[in-house]
Amino acid sequence: MTKQFWLGLVAGIVICGVVGGLFGVSMVGKKATVPPSEFEARFVNYLKTIRIPEAPAPSTPIEVSDENLFEGGERYNRHCAACHDLEGDADSDFAKAFNPPVADLTSEEVQRYSDGQLKRIVDSGIRFTGMPGWKGALDETTQWKIVYYMRALADSEKAERLEAGLKARGKWEMEAPGGDHHQGEGEEHERAHPEPEHHHESGHEH
Ligand code: HEC
């Protein structure tokens, strides 16, 4: 037993070292501007989906009415569309330049989350990615309305109807990242465009 055990242990350590080393080198040497390989994108995506906890349901139920969806849409267009696009499909070069790329909100992967998980994602963001958390910047009710709006974006009929309604209200415009915004409604100090480039929370590796 002992011989096999030691051989196994040594082999295990060597394999871990090689694999870990390769992975480490491939992360460190690269600029974030290089698009992630398919494997890397999947792997990073997998890591973070292992466990996204549910946020508790709203203390006062929020009706999924047109009014609330329009409001969610206005806020979405203003705070999220710069990265996720107005349609939610993240189909821009800007969106694809992120590592991992900005998520397609209409995709099965995202729609698989429960409402509570989506709310948690909006509230807390996703560490090590460009997805910011909005705790404090967007109140609870607004976050839930945005969650319901994200559901509607994945339903082409609803999405079209809401798009028409938002256009009619003059709210079918995204705010440029870093954008100057021109609708003076006394809400200027809200965080409309967190900066995607700096991830200081991942620690200091100097
Ligand atoms: C600065 C760019 C940026 C902004 C602004 C932004 N996001 Fe994201 N978002 C991202 C990126 C990048 C990802 C992909 C992260 C990942 O794959 O883990 C993402 C992922 C997501 C996901 C999916 C997470 C997953 O696990 O697949 C949801 C849901 C989401 N964002 C919602 C929103 C909402 C709602 C807003 C506005 C309140 C918003 N995002 C604003 C960059 C942004």
Image: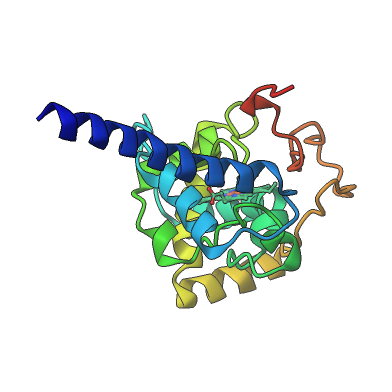
- The picture places residue 29, in percent across and down from the top left corner, at 71, 45
Determine the residue positioned at 76% across, 41% down: 197
Q: Is residue 190 left or right of residue 13?
A: right
Q: Is residue 90 above or below residue 157?
A: above
Q: Is residue 59 above or below residue 103?
A: above
In front of the other: 205 or 55: 205
Q: Is residue 133 above or below residue 174?
A: above
User: Can residue 185 be seen at all in this image of the molecule?
Assistant: yes
Instruction: Give residue 186's quadrant in the image.
Output: top right
Picture quarter with the C terminus: top right
- The picture places residue 147, in percent across and down from the top left corner, at 47, 49
Q: Is residue 69 above or below residue 7?
A: below
Determine the residue positioned at 67% across, 41% down: 28
Find the residue positioned furthest to the left: 1
- The picture places residue 91, in percent across and down from the top left corner, at 65, 70
Determine the residue positioned at 40% across, 46% down: 49
Q: Is residue 79 left or right of residue 15?
A: right
Q: Is residue 55 left or right of residue 2?
A: right
User: Can residue 57 be seen at all in this image of the molecule?
Assistant: no
- The picture places residue 34, in percent across and down from the top left corner, at 72, 57
Determine the residue positioned at 49% across, 66% down: 106
